[in-house]
Image: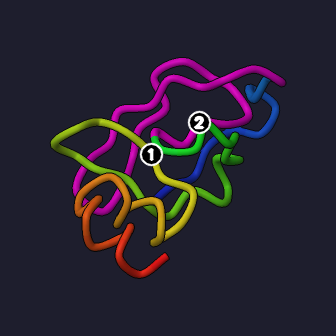
Amino acid sequence: MLNRFDRSATTAGEAEVKFLDGDFRVVKPGAFVRCAVTGVPIPLEELKYWSVDLQEAYVSPEAVMQRHHPLQADAKA
């Protein structure tokens, strides 16, 4: 099953994750990853947005736009 992990292995710290197409693999257990744009912690069970090419996570679609299309994101703000 996609994005499943053993909750008993989860620690309170930051996880290390390998981002794949449509899924991710936890390399080092933890409770969250950080958004590459905002620095906001993202609980692994809420992680929905990431870049396979850049190997980074995003907290929201707006953060994805800021990272990949900064001029367009600024114009909408």
Horizontal placement of 21 versus 30: left or right? left
| Label pair 1/2, CB-CB below 8 angstroms | yes
Query: Element type at marker 1?
Result: strand
Query: What residue is pinned by disc 1?
Result: 57
Comes first in the chain, label 1 or label 2: 2
Horizontal placement of 54 versus 28: left or right? left
- Residue sitting at 16 percent across and 42 percent down? 53
Q: Which corner quadrant of the image does residue 56 belong to?
A: top left
Q: Can you give x and y, in whole percent of width and height, for residue 6 in the image?
A: 69, 39
- Residue sitting at 44 percent across and 45 percent down? 57
Where 75 sits versus 27, above or below?
below
* Label placed on residue 28: none
Question: Farthest residue in the left direction?
Answer: 53
* Label placed on residue 34: 2
Q: Amino acid at mark 1?
A: Ala
Please report the bounds of the magenta region as a residue range: 12-36
